[in-house]
Amino acid sequence: MRTPRIYTDQELSAKALVTLENGPAKHLSRVLRMGPGDDLSVFNGDGGEYPATIKSADRKRVVVETGKLRAENCESPLAIELGIAVSRGERMDWVIQKATELGVTRITPLLSKRVEVKLNAERTAKRLRHWHQVAISACEQCGRNRLPALGSITSLADWVAVTQAERRFVLHPQADASKDSGQTPASVALLIGPEGGLTKTEISLAEDAGFEPLQLGPRVLRTETAPLAALAIMQARWGDMA
């Protein structure tokens, strides 16, 4: 069995006893059925991870002892911020999970004209907590030791106005076939609309803010497919997916 990787929101150091939070503890003891003497790795998002061994375990409480820090880094040299309109059902979960695996640095959920999801303050807070956990689980699986930042839900207009990446792209099927200018950026931002797409006004707003129109071929991609295709292309061209 692959050695499990567990995220903890605690300070970590070598040769320390760490009592894991309830969620990870239950996962290790009830789902994976691990117990004293079993090995795992723990990380807290600061970079690096610690090999660890379970010292004690029951159905609610797991204590591990950490080993020496492994300063492993699998972060991309390309900083990517993804601004994506909030979508219904599990689409948003899918995008956050896969974007995390593809090395995105920051994800900002956006509200645009054609977003059909209605969120009050309570539901917004609940969604953000859920998406944070989706990103954590993706990091545990893919080997990342740093969590992507998750921005607050904001309006598309506000986001395009403050995004400062070296190159910024707005993806829409009406864009002309993309031509690479040859500039290799250290940071990029990618704007993706909702299921119904961005309006002409929103596209113009983004372009006026310095976003380059981007097209990924003749087929119209779904809102959960488009960002993943674009992220993979950007990582292959400028990042670490050579």
Image: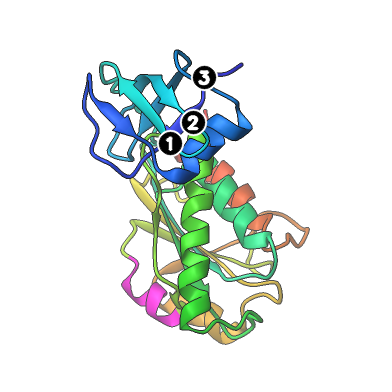
| Cα distance in 3D space between marks 3 and 2 | 19 Å
- Mark 3, other Cα within 10 Å: few <14 / some 14–19 / many ≥20: few
Pointer 1 or 3: first along the chain: 3
Say if 73 sits above or below 138 in the image: above
* Magenta highlight on residue 161: yes
Q: Amino acid at mark 3?
A: Thr
- Reading the image, the residue beneath label 3 is 3
Q: Determine the residue located farthest toward the right in the rendered image.
A: 219
- Magenta residues span 157-163
Find residue 7 and report its horizontal and vertical position in percent. 41, 38
* Residue 102 visible: no
Q: Label 2 is placed on what type of residue? A: Asp
Q: Which element is circle 2 on?
A: loop
Verify CB contact (< 8 Å) between mark 1 and mark 2: yes
> Label 1 belongs to which residue?
61
Residue at 35%, 77% in the rendered image:
161
Residue 129, percent from left and from top = 46, 62
Residue 192 in sight in this render: yes
Residue 5 among those drawn in magenta: no
Which disc is residue 58 wearing?
A: 2
